[in-house]
Image: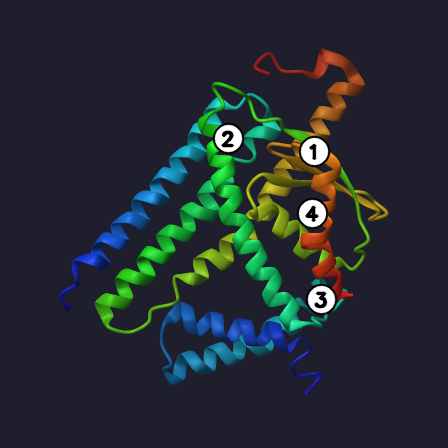
Amino acid sequence: MSEMSWWVEAGVALLLVASGLFTLTGAVGLVRLNDYFQRMHPPALAYTFGAWCITLASILYFSMQEQQLVLHPWVIIMLLSITVPITTILLARAALFRRRQVQRLGKALMSPGE
Amino acid sequence: MRRLLPSPLLSLALFALWLALNHSMAPGHLIMAALLAILMPILLAPLRPYPARIRHPLVLMRLILTVGHDVILSNLSVGWGVLRSHRCMPRGAFVRIPLELRSPAALAALSTITTVVPGTVWCELMLDRSSLLLHVFDLDDEAEFIAHFKSRYERPLKEIFE
């Protein structure tokens, strides 16, 4: 293992902190927003910027450590952005279906928690 | 050649993906990658009834850059919207967007883009594919948003896939 210069370590640390902050913001949004469809948006921060920053940090760190370009963490981002929309759209469809049922059948269908 | 590799791009992607995941160019991994690249498209062919063709690689590159740029900007705006939501709630709304895209591959790409970019969630595609229902995190001006959306994502996708 080779010595790493301080600016690489600083850059990696900065990226990790940024990723944490964005993921935390997403979690705060999940708690604070009051509408189901509004709450679908904040988690996007975690799987885009949160994941991007961590991936960039690991590429930077391991490339410097192994003294060669390590690009395969990039696969995580690609697979995330292909697979996440599937669950997101399924959730949106289910919520839309429920909302329409409530509109059609009145409040009888609503659970007490809503 | 056509029969062996019905979708060369998919085969190439699988080959590269396998080598990247294993992070090695050893002969064993090369053979495994080649097997995957040849067998997977054949096994998956029944699931992909409409083969997609990508026409303008330059437009595709530009679209990828546009999406990357938009992801960064809308991350900041959604994050900001969440942090100041105790003072004013973001104006979430459903938007119905009339579509000109018809090809299934282009619509799949569009749904991926809208879901990956924070601030928009793909909710529903009309059965006749004439329009789509989006939920927008903070909507300012509906007509402006629709025009922006169509020129930024729909037009390049139409060029690439149709």
Chain-order first, disc 2 or disc 3: 2
Q: Position of residue B155 (x, y in %)?
A: 74, 58
What residue is drawn where x is 70% and y is 16%?
A109
Of B111 and B21, which appears nearest the observer?
Answer: B111
Q: Position of residue B47 (x, y in %)?
A: 70, 62
Chain-order first, disc 3 or disc 1: 1
Residue at mark 2: B81
Which chain contains the residue that carries disc 3?
B
Q: Nearer the viewer, mark 2 or mark 1?
A: 1
Between marks 1 and 4, how big is the CA–CA gap?
12 Å
Q: Nearer the viewer, mark 2 or mark 3?
A: 2
* Image quadrant in which the C terminus of chain A is located: top right
A9 vs B81, left or right, is: left
Chain-order first, disc 4 or disc 3: 4
Residue at mark 1: B141
What residue is drawn where x is 36% and y is 38%?
A21
Secondary element at image label 1: loop
Residue at mark 4: B149
Secondary element at image label 4: helix
Instruction: For label 3, count other residues whose C-alpha is less than 10 Å away and answer few (under 14), some (14-19) or many (20+).
Output: some
Which chain contains the residue that carries disc 2?
B
Q: What label does residue A50 carry, if any?
A: none
